[in-house]
Amino acid sequence: MKDFLLKKEVVKLAREALADELFASVIYSRLAGLYAGESVKSKLIKISKMEGEHVSFWQEFLKRRGFDISNVKVSKLKLALYTIIFRLIGLGLTLRILEMGENKAIELYSRMLESEELDDYEKNKLRKILEDELVHEQEFAEEESKFEEFLEHVRDTILGMNDGLVEVLSVTTGLAGVYGSPFHVALGGLIVGAAGALSMGIGALASVRAQRQVHEGVLQRISVASRYVGHVFKDRVVNYMIKKGYSKEISEAIAEESSKNHKLLSKVIAEEEYGIKEETLENPFRAGLYTGLAYAFGAFVPLVPYFIGIPISIAMLLSLIFAGAALAFTGFIIAISASLTVKKKVIEMILAGLGSAGVTFIIGRVLSMLFGVEVG
């Protein structure tokens, strides 16, 4: 009975692997056809063919165990969804989503390699597939590095938009509990949104500027020291490398090599001791602009229904629906840019935003009843 359950589990995992690899082969081919850049296109075609080889392995694997593979097909709906995602957010973030699926595949293959149900031939082939996954994951990493600055701004923008969305949604829903006029609710929300956008933009600019000045001061000090008295850093580099797990001999060799180039030495010290990378220092004016504009956009979303002039109850309902959709979108972008679980993050964002709005609505109604404030 134990062997049967083990075999059943392996077949189940193999079927999942076949479905994933089949979809990967098709979607990479589809992306290659949609992307204009020849270098990236050739990489996508190469990966699609590689995934196709993996598909053949899993098909044979399941056939040998008497499993009917004819019902394992690519979902046209899923394929269309990923195509739309690519057109909306571009290749960088689309690759992030696909990479999250690759990580799950690597975990699945690791589990299967521990099973006694696979013979030596199958385990060797599976190790090769695992190697392929890690290799083309590295190709993704190299390609995604071109989008790192974009992804950083996406995160800043989305977080700013989310702040504006949640705060103004909470305010307008609270005001809707007091006022009977959509116009008064819209006006109050607009004032809060404008003030919030200015505050967030200026705050982001000041914060990032102060942080950048501190980091630049540290980098300048390290640069000067490494140029003229670099020997004082050698022992530190040795200690850093030993803490990372390198042997003393290798650590000393790294320190010796680093000390020959003051720029390399200062880079090592800055990153290891202070956690600062010069290339990642953020532009304060750009951060302030993005954050302020994103906040303003997020703040405007829940206000739209109140400006239309429809009854307050309908306006509030539409405001919640618009906000829910926007919260789902922000959760989606945050999840894929930070490699988090999309479903969990989307639900978290919606519950937090609408929950906040619900609480403020109740507060508004309570205050309205207590103080007899009701504006029609």
Image (cartoon, grey):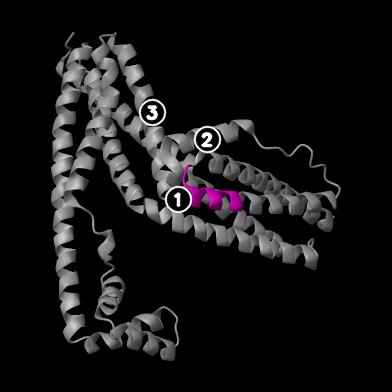
Amino acid type, label 1: Ser
Closer to the chain start, of discs 3 and 1, is 3
In the image, 228 versus 1, the foreground residue is: 228
The secondary structure that most of the magenta stretch takes on is: helix
User: Dot 1, crowdedness within 10 Å: few (<14), some or many (≥20)?
Assistant: some
Contact (CB < 8 A) between labels 1 and 2? no
Q: Quadrant of the N terminus?
A: bottom right
Q: Position of residue 49 (x, y in %)?
A: 65, 51
Closer to the chain start, of discs 1 and 2, is 2
Position of 81 relative to 116 (above/below): above
Q: Quadrant of residue 313?
A: top left
Task: Identify the magenta region.
Answer: 36-47
Instruction: Report the side of 25 relative to 44 (left or right).
Output: right
Location of mark 1 (residue): 339
Location of mark 3 (residue): 324
Q: Residue at x 78, y 56 (%)?
A: 6
Q: Is residue 281 visible?
A: yes
Q: Residue furthest front?
A: 38
Amino acid type, label 2: Thr
Considering the numbered disc 1 on the image, is that residue within a helix, a strand or a loop?
A: loop
Location of mark 2 (residue): 83
Position of 299 relative to 10 (above/below): above
